[in-house]
Amino acid sequence: MFNLECRRRALLLHHMKKLILLTTVIAGLMAIGCTGAKSPQDRLLANEAKINDIISQMTLEEKVNMLHSKTNMSSAGVERLGIADMNYADGPFGIREEGVPNGFQSAGWTVDSATYFPTGSALAATWSEDLAYKYGTGMGKEARLRGKDIILGPAINIQRLPVGGRSYEYLSEDPILSAALSLYYTKGVQDQGTAVCIKHFALNNQETNRGSVNVVVDERTMREIYLKPFERAVVEGGAMSVMPAYNRVNGDYCSENEHLLNEILRGDWGFLGMTVSDWGGTHSTMGAMLHGLNVQMTGSSYLGPAVIDSINTGALTEAQVDEKVRQILRVRFAIEPVPADQANQAITSQPESQAIARQVAEKSIVLLKNEGILPIKSGVKKIAVIGQNAVLKTQSGGVGAGVKALYEITPLQGIQTRAGKNNIEVAYAPGYKNFPGRRWGGAAATPDPLVATAIDEPADPSLMAEAVELAKNSDIVIFFAGTNKSIETEGSDRSDIKLPCGQEELVRALREANPNLATVLISGGPTDLQVLEPASPAILQGWWNGMEGGTALAEVLFGDIAPSGKLPFTFPVKLEDSPAYAMGNFPNDTKEMDLFTSLYRPDMTPAERQALNAKRPIPQSPYTERFYVGYRWFDTKNVKPMFAFGHGLSYVTFGYGDIKAAASKKNVKVTFTLKNEGGMDADEVVQLYVKRIGSKVEWPEKELKAFSRVSLKAGESREVTLEIPMNDLRYWDEASNGWALEHGKLQLLLGSASDDIRQTAEVTI
Ligand code: BGC
């Protein structure tokens, strides 16, 4: 009965899909014929005849062999027909070190040291499409040097939770900013002949129970907020592959989610490439085959022999397998395989990528607060650098996104090198213990005086005394606070955003010892600054800023360049102010464990973990805060944040001239003059928000709709134009199940941050 029903469904779906594919191809051909314009996805259609021919020569076994992993980081081609294997590489910030064929353990190579680029939120803090493109080119080129076809990245989920374990990998809480950077990163990679695999599609916004949690979200919120970055990367960037996420969305796992994979991705967005499940994220043969998955990573439990059995029983047809193979081959032929004798001949990290990593780091650092402390004054003779985050390397950790960097300049090294040029003395004290996270095999045999056993351990008296003494005897204190990549990591969310290991107590003591104090926050996501902010007259957000992070930070501290990063997310005063917490939507089911979180329970056997997983109820994650994500919530509910979305100071001020605004059928255009009023060259990121006036539709207080990074010489003025495409003003209308434009008045809010609006104008659309 089940088989018959499945077969009927499968056949129906298959015919429908054939029709859709045919319509897509015809529509594509018509568009080319009529306008000469090609959609970026169309490059995947260049080899259809060749693909037909190859499929006709393949055995069923050869076809099915392409639908699952060959090794931990590859899926098979067909050697007999000259079809190369597909080689994958993590991750978003650098080509991951080569692993052994069947796992993540190091293969022990030396040629695979790569460029470690700034992490996701740091890239987003540049608000620069140009830098996102360059970053992509760096990743794409290094992937080629390593013989890789597909990069498992960029990671472009929206930062919904301040505690999110992967917030540092992701870009922003805002869809317009995330989408623009995702698009340019994608173009940068794919212009080098490497494919992206944008991840994690979709709504992988929490790590807690990520392998089982069911996200319950309404269509409007999903389309306007969470899917936007994916949509632009696919539709405008021509992203060739997509990684369905671990979690469920509205009932179904993402790797077998008809609505996400077939209706939206392939249907609405015209995606022609392949989907690759997250590692261990495939859950059934029929679900994956019918609802949009191409490749099971890793293993072959579902998209292996079981597919052949299902064909034999009549539950699936070979034509359905052909379609999956066709989608994989499109990517295979769009990406030239790197010949084995050309891969890994040169070291992965190349000087031009290192230069890009440095440029991104330079433009990402955010000056959150400055009461005349920075840049470091010329009379300074001795600098106290305090805090282990000044010396801890950040390239590895965080699970999948670690990089084996060719080198990494720590903040302390960056400061020492720069200070050396002016004969300034630099002295270092660790100040606090480092919390290294979960430890395999329990606590270390001999306790390390610099290692904490709990994240909330109070300040260590002797480390604190040493740091205070140094602060007293120095002209300026640079305090390195923040988290680390064991605290913010894939696989778990933080339980709060408090600064760890007594950092709050320490900063108070340092301030008493020396009021000339600047704090640099080294973290990927926001931290609670209720104690630190009043104690620290200057604060920088320094991120995990790649292998050149220390160099860039020193340039900013010494005033060689002006800081110009802007926050890509809101710093709440306290965690409970943020939307998912305020609505009681998170934490959810945190006591339950799933396959992934339970991996960290060394006391359980794999069988026990599986059994626990099988009998537990499905954890639910309701998104009832809807589209009020990040600043959309804070602004609408009038909750004051510690530092607002888009905030970031400079060493100069910028003058915003009057704005001219006009609306046409195509777009809304704003023109104004921006002036650098200071005595040094500097960049400003201008931001245009929209507020609806007299609207019948529900909207947040305001929404970012356009932005631009503008570089100005000291004293220079420039006319700047920002454009909002009309499509970006639409909303998802649940009644008609489509995009709709609400005509009416818009207030345009132009400024330097979401809470620093300098000019306004009104237009009617
Ligand atoms: C992560 C992915 C990553 C994959 C392969 C998974 O655990 O979620 O982002 O690409 O592992 O390393």
Image (tube, rainbow, N blue to C red):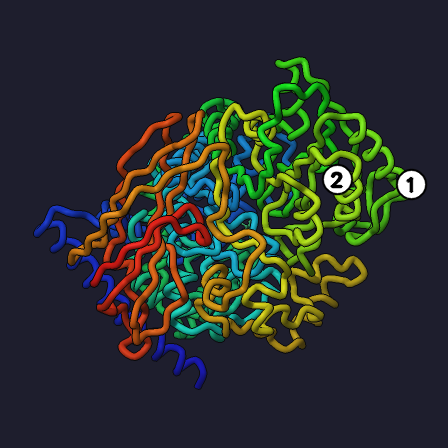
Establish if 170 lies above or below 306: above
Which residue is pictured at 87% across the width and 36% down the height? 465
Query: Residue 611 at x, y = what percent?
Result: 70, 71
Residue 520 is left or right of residue 335, and the answer is right
Amino acid type assigned to the residue bearing label 1 in the image:
Thr
Please state the horizontal and vertical placement of residue 709, each as a whole percent of the image.
38, 39
Please rate how many residues cluster around mark 2, counting C-alpha atoms within 10 Å: few if below 14, some from 14 to 19, many from 20.
Answer: many
Q: How many marks?
A: 2
Left or right, 63 with respect to 527, comes to left
Residue at the left extreme of this rendering: 34
Task: Name which of mark 2 and mark 1 comes first in the sequence.
Answer: 1
- Give the camera-side residue of 203 and 366: 366
Image quarter hosting the C terminus: bottom left
Q: Is residue 732 left or right of residue 576?
A: left
Q: Are marks 2 and 1 in contact (CB under 8 Å)?
A: no
Residue found at x 48% / y 61%:
303
Name the amino acid, label 2: Arg
Query: What residue is disc 2 on?
Result: 511
Instruction: Kindly identify which residue carries mark 1.
Output: 446
- Can residue 13 be seen here? yes
Towards the viewer: 469 or 75 = 469
Q: Residue at x 44, y 50 (%)?
A: 756
Please identify the quadrant where the N terminus is shown: bottom left
Where in the figure is residue 443, as x and y percent of width and height?
A: 86, 48
Cβ of mark 1 under 8 Å from ligand 1: the answer is no
Q: Which mark is residue 433?
A: none
Image coords of residue 22 (percent x, y): 20, 62
Please tell me whether mark 1 sits on a helix, a strand or a loop: loop
Query: Label 2 to label 1, Cα distance in Å?
Result: 33 Å
> What residue lies at 65% left-to-right and 73% top-to-bottom?
614
Residue placed most toward the observer, 337 or 29? 29
